[in-house]
Amino acid sequence: MAPPTSETLTAERILEVTEEVLRRHGPAKATVVDVARALGVSHGSVYRHFRTKAALREAVTKRWLDRTSQTLARIAGTTDETAPEALRQWFGALFAAKRHKAGDDPELFATYSVLLADASRVVEEHVRELVGQLTDIVGRGVREGDFAAVDGDAAATARALFDATNRFHDPAYAREWEQPGIQDEFTAVVDLVLRGLRP
């Protein structure tokens, strides 16, 4: 056990340490006791913030996904660029974030890939949020005359865009993200998507 700490135990601190423990031990071996030990507290202290191991894992997964969502929300919310420029930048930032996570910290990315499979509610909320951001961009593009939505439905169009670009953000494709030519392939798909949205 780490030496007891006088630092106030917060949910955020627990999540930070849980991420470190998951990186070190992986999802199969990491336990709440390991997290508590790293914090210098009893496992009961961790359970006061997160009622179950599953709740802790869901919270860590949500925190990880939220990092990407927050960056993308800023892009979706900007009015400094046209909707086509914002859409290109949004997809570029999503792809860059996923590649960064997979390439720079493969152990943690592998851990999160396992956790994502167990946290379907968190993943569904994340996807809903991302599609909502795309809906905002598409809706703005329709209002400004840059885009034509499928059957006039910005939300359905946004979902179709998200699904069409799946290869560049779904962790199942992570091995392809470092292949030669992947950036050109990504650019070609985004170019095609933007041409398809023209009125």
Image: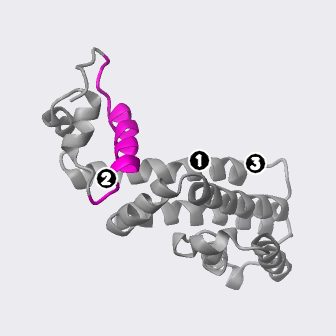
Q: Name the residue under label 2.
A: 57
Kindly identify the residue that appears in the image at 28 percent across and 30 percent down: 39
Q: Position of residue 47 (x, y in %)?
A: 18, 40
Q: How crowded is mark 2: few (under 14 residues within 10 Å), some or many (20 or more)?
A: many
Q: Is residue 31 above or below residue 199?
A: above
Residue 23 inside the magenta-drawn segment: yes
Q: Hey, which quadrant is residue 5 in on the image?
A: top left
Write the residue at 65% across / 53% down: 72
Instruction: Please report the residue visible at 20 percent of the width from the left and 28 percent of the height from the top.
Output: 41
What amino acid does circle 3 point to?
A: Thr
Q: Are marks 2 and 1 in contact (CB under 8 Å)?
A: no
Mark 2 element type: helix
The residue depicted at 34 percent of the width and 63 percent of the height is 119
- The three-letter amino acid code for the residue at tag 1 is Gln
Q: In this view, does 11 lie to the left or right of 94?
A: left
Residue indicated by mark 3? 78
Which amino acid is tagged 2? Arg
In the depicted structure, whether residue 86 falls above or below residue 60: below
